[in-house]
Image (cartoon, rainbow, N blue to C red):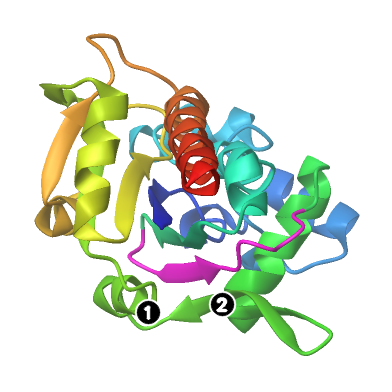
């Protein structure tokens, strides 16, 4: 079984220092929301964030959106071998995502859904939880019965991905940790939970590319394994 941990995600409200700015107030009026309830997207507020160094590396929820769609759209999810998806935010909040969730494909609908999640702590449909906040990272890993945690970064050691995954699956449920931020390295919170750190290559790769490589490899392993078991 597999678990995906999307680390250091930019999932936060508009910083308090910006909420009174006319661009934020105007955007809030358009969205029919209060400035403090808006999700922070630096692209939408580029004119006021480009001059603030402490905000340059924040406000990219679009990376999380693409990463979630990559996982949820995969055959791996449809095969039922993805036990869970965990989101860890830059503010240290933890959310679990049901692998059967149908995420909005339109980005602005995704923004609205994430704003609701931040404000209410849970997204429900028909009484079933789709995304919900949990107390901490350890609780999320325990809920997903994770046995081995693997981080993906160019700082890690280079491996043959297929052989490596096949070997680690002997431990049981494997959790892949992929950063969903533009650049940099995992936060200290994430580094502490890693059992291993591996690399797909010497260059910096996007979160979507890393997830695609991992997912395709895992799908191939699972499908081949299922074919082999049928032969016997």
Does the rendering let one see residue 162?
yes
Is tag 1's residue or tag 2's residue first in the polypeptide sequence? 2
Rendered residue at 39%/72% (across/down): 144
In this view, the residue in front, 62 or 201, is: 201
Q: Residue 218's x, y, as percent? A: 44, 37
Q: Are marks 1 and 2 in contact (CB under 8 Å)?
A: no
**Magenta segment, prevailing SS (helix, strand or loop):** loop
Q: Which residue matches tag 2?
A: 132
Give the side of residue 218 with respect to residue 193, left or right: right
* Residue 105, horizontal then vertical, whole percent: 80, 43
**110 over 201 or under it: above or below:** below
Q: Is residue 163 above or below residue 40?
A: above
Residue drawn at x 55%, y 52% as measured from the top left: 18
Furthest-front residue in this view = 232
Check if residue 99 falls in the magenta segment.
Answer: yes
Per the image, the residue denoted by label 1 is: 143
Q: Position of residue 163 (x, y in %)?
A: 24, 28
Q: Secondary structure at mark 2?
A: strand
Residue at the (82%, 52%) spot, across then down: 109
The answer to which image quadrant residue 42 occupies is top right
Disc number for residue 190: none
Query: Residue 41: in sight, yes or no?
Result: no
**Which span of residues is magenta-colored?**
91-103
Q: Is residue 200 left or right of residue 84?
A: left
């Amino acid at each position: 079984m597999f678990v995906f941990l999307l680390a250091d995600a930019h999932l936060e409200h508009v910083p308090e220092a910006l909420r009174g700015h006319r661009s934020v107030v105007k955007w809030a009026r358009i969205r029919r929301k209060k400035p403090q309830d808006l999700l922070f997207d630096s692209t939408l507020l580029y004119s006021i964030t480009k001059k603030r160094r402490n905000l340059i590396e924040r406000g990219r929820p679009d990376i999380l959106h693409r990463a979630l769609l990559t996982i949820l759209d995969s055959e791996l999810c449809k095969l039922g071998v993805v036990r869970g998806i965990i989101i860890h935010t830059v503010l240290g909040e933890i959310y679990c995502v049901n692998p059967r969730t149908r995420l909005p494909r339109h980005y602005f609908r995704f923004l609205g859904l994430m704003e609701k999640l931040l404000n209410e702590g849970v997204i429900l449909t028909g009484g079933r939880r789709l995304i919900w906040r949990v107390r901490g990272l350890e609780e999320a890993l325990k809920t997903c019965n994770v046995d081995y945690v693997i981080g993906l970064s160019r700082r890690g050691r280079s491996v043959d991905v297929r052989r490596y995954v096949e070997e680690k699956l002997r431990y049981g449920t494997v959790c892949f940790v992929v950063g969903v931020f533009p650049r940099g390295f995992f936060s200290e919170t994430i580094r502490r939970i890693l059992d291993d750190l591996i690399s797909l290559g010497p260059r910096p790769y996007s979160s979507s590319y890393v997830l695609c490589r991992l997912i395709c490899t895992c799908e191939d392993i699972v499908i081949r394994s299922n074919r082999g078991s049928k032969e016997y």
